[in-house]
Image (cartoon, rainbow, N blue to C red):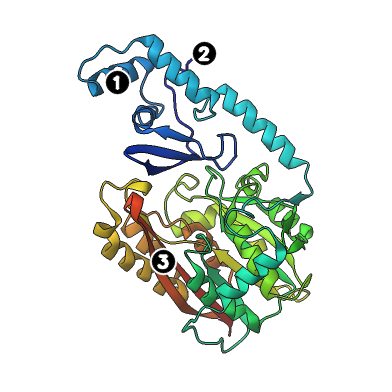
Amino acid sequence: MKVNKTPRVRRDLEFFPVRQGNSQFVLVRDPLGLVEEGKAVPWPLYEFMTLLDGTHTVRDVQMSLMRQKGGVLVGAAEVEALLNHLDKSFILDTEGYEHAREKLVAQFAVKTARPCSHSGRSYPDNPADLKSRLDEILETPTPAPEPEARVIALVAPHIDLSVGSRVYASAYQWLRHTSPSRVVVLGVGHQMMGDLFCLTKKDFETPLGVVKNDRKGVKELRDAGRGIVSENDFAHRAEHSVEFQTIFLQHVLPENSFTLIPILCGPLMPSLSGYSRSAYRETAGPFLKVLSGLLSHGDHDTLVVAGVDFSHIGPKFGHNMPASHLQSESEMHDKNLLRAFSNMQTDGFWEESARVKDQFNVCGFSAMACLMEVLPPSSGQILDYEIWHEQPTRSAVSFAAAGFTAH
């Protein structure tokens, strides 16, 4: 490998500290599957990797290693060997990684159906076992009241099913009172950067069967979203935020009763000229207009589901203090967002996010912002809210359920 002058670890990887006996390691999770499943790196190597952010030269890295080792000489060959190891493991953003990724993109592009990426890991891959698991979740006691009118939109989590079972139940129990012929799912494009939306015309496969794609609706949206929609649909390949909603929809709604429009919403800050509702509407206006029209077409009874989570706090998400020290502020922020969201106070929703400069990493903001612009007149209701703490990383994620009924 020819070492880049400023080597950088891939931005799409996730890292989780684990302990084995008296030794500490960091587990590497790769949404593309290029990094070996279950690969863990020793803590000293992880500390070396934190230096590889694309701004430090190889010489800078060498000097930092020497300082970490109390002035012990670290040779250029040693640094080179570490970089070569990381490159061969697909951990670095290099030409080798880019070529491997391009191959995956091409392989995914020719598929007519998106295979499920999380079955057998996040939920059972056996249909009977999955149905049993979903029944178990939906039977979770929940205080959510029944809807008083036709359900037109739903907000549900996309956190792991075992963690969010009660809130998933609060959301999807509401769907027992509706029978849409088409569902628009607004997911979060966790790996997206620079595009507002990512569409796919693929059908969705799960252990419960295949959900047909509404390709006509997807084409209308793609035509309207030129310049803000991803050129390819690769972001859908390993994204769970739509997949998790799909298995619940298949389980709750009658078999083969609906088609799907899967939309991933990317982060807004990198994609807008300014972080404001007006900038969003100006940039995404034609796309939002077509999506709003799809929701009001008389030939389809269309439901919208947003698969979102709320605050992500603690060291795992870039904070320099544990989640317990941030929770009171992040919870207040979540509830301010939910209050504005459920009351359709769109300007207030944006103002609340701008107030904290998105310091609590609300990953579902873009999907909810989209939903608020396209919903017909409706009444919103907060159904549930919960915070999950991941003790090993001293971090936490919040999530919620909400529903909207037609006026």
Q: Nearer the viewer, mark 3 or mark 1?
A: 1
Residue of label 1: 65
Number of marks in the image? 3
Secondary structure under badge 2?
loop
Q: Is residue 220 left or right of residue 37?
A: right
**Residue 284, position in %: x, y?**
57, 54
Quadrant of the rendering where the C terminus is positioned: bottom right
Q: How many neighbours does mark 1 have within 10 angstroms: few (below 14), some (14-19), or many (20 or more)?
A: many
Q: How far apart are labels 3 and 1 at the CA level?
A: 45 Å
Q: Nearer the viewer, mark 2 or mark 3?
A: 2
> Given contact means CB atoms under 8 Å apart, are the residues at marks 2 and 3 in contact?
no
Q: Height in image: 49 above or below 369?
A: above
**Residue 229, position in %: x, y?**
63, 48
- Say if residue 377 shows up in the picture: no
Q: Height in image: 2 above or below 129?
A: above
Secondary structure under badge 1?
helix
Residue of label 3: 349
For badge 1, the amino acid type reads: Leu
Q: Looking at this view, is 232 or 322 the one in front? A: 322
What residue sits 65% from the left and 65% below the top?
130
- Say if residue 14 shows up in the picture: yes
